[in-house]
């Protein structure tokens, strides 16, 4: 299949394109320069595999939780292609994407993102199934989701930070994490093609990112 996928949920973003068996992946750790670099990066990976946007069979992205700015940026870029060329666009929740490559692990999984303000976005999985829906909590509150006698493998870019924060308040927790850099684009290809095989609908025009936390602007709105 011919496809384009992007992960813009955190500061380090990934863009990948594939033309059947030929795949090119680009990693950008650009901080605040994401906005000016994303579109040229998309053009670059498509060119490297000999594709134009109109040639794509589908696109996919991480839909959240994650950075407000990053998620909006990724969604806007791919929706523009969707509108111009009618290419189906599929959304995969970020924490599910992080957990995907570890779904056969014996340990329970905790998929995490640093949500700043001393909080984490997280979700918990057992035998490849989500058993705790995504939440946005401080370490002390996260403890209520965990059991001391259960081994957990923590996945995601911010897993070392999560383990450090949790063990500081609960040293008996059995937490470990994978030191290898996580490239999320392979999981996005696989998850999107699973959705296509199951005939799940792509995103509609009105669909947007999946946010757990309210934006600062929303928090300032008067309560009804």
Image (cartoon, helix red, strand yellow):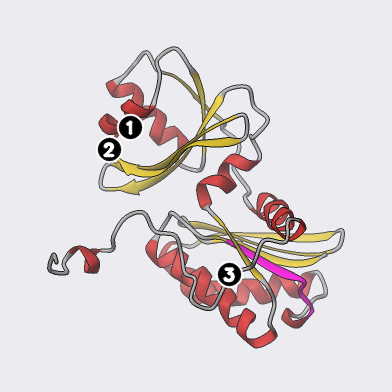
What residue span does the magenta drawing correspond to? Answer: 55-61
- Specify whether residue 60 is painted magenta: yes
Left or right of 190? Residue 213 is left
Please tell me whether residue 129 is drawn above or below residue 106 in the rendered image.
below
Q: Is mark 3 on a helix, strand or loop?
A: loop
Q: Name the residue under label 2.
A: 138
Q: Mark 3 points at which residue?
A: 203
Residue at 59 percent across and 48 percent down: it is 97
Left or right of 48? Residue 40 is left
Quarter occupied by the N terminus: bottom right
**Label pair 2/1, CB-CB below 8 angstroms:** yes
Q: Distance between the residues labelled 3 and 1?
A: 31 Å
Residue at 73 percent across and 56 percent down: it is 198
Quarter occupied by the C terminus: bottom left
Q: Distance between the residues labelled 3 and 2?
A: 31 Å
**Label pair 3/1, CB-CB below 8 angstroms:** no
């Amino acid at each position: 299949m011919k496809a384009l996928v992007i992960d813009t949920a955190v500061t380090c973003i990934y863009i990948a394109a594939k033309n059947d068996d030929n795949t090119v992946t680009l990693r950008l750790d650009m901080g605040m320069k994401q906005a000016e670099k994303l579109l040229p990066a998309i053009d670059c990976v498509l060119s490297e595999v000999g594709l134009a946007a109109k040639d794509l069979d589908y696109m996919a992205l991480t839909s959240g939780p994650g950075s407000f700015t990053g998620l909006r940026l990724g969604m806007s870029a791919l929706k523009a292609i969707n509108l111009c060329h009618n290419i189906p666009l599929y959304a995969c929740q970020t924490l599910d994407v992080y957990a995907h490559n570890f779904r056969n692990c014996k340990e329970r999984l905790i998929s995490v993102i640093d949500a700043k303000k001393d909080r984490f976005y997280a979700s918990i999985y057992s035998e490849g199934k989500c058993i705790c829906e995504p939440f946005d909590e401080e370490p002390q509150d996260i403890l209520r989701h965990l059991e001391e006698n259960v081994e957990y493998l923590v996945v995601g870019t911010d897993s070392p930070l999560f383990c450090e924060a949790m063990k500081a308040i609960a040293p008996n927790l059995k937490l470990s994490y994978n030191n290898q850099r996580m490239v999320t684009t392979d999981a996005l290809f696989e998850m999107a093609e699973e959705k296509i095989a199951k005939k799940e609908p792509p995103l509609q025009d009105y669909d947007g990112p999946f946010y757990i936390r309210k934006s600062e602007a929303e928090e300032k709105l008067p309560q009804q």
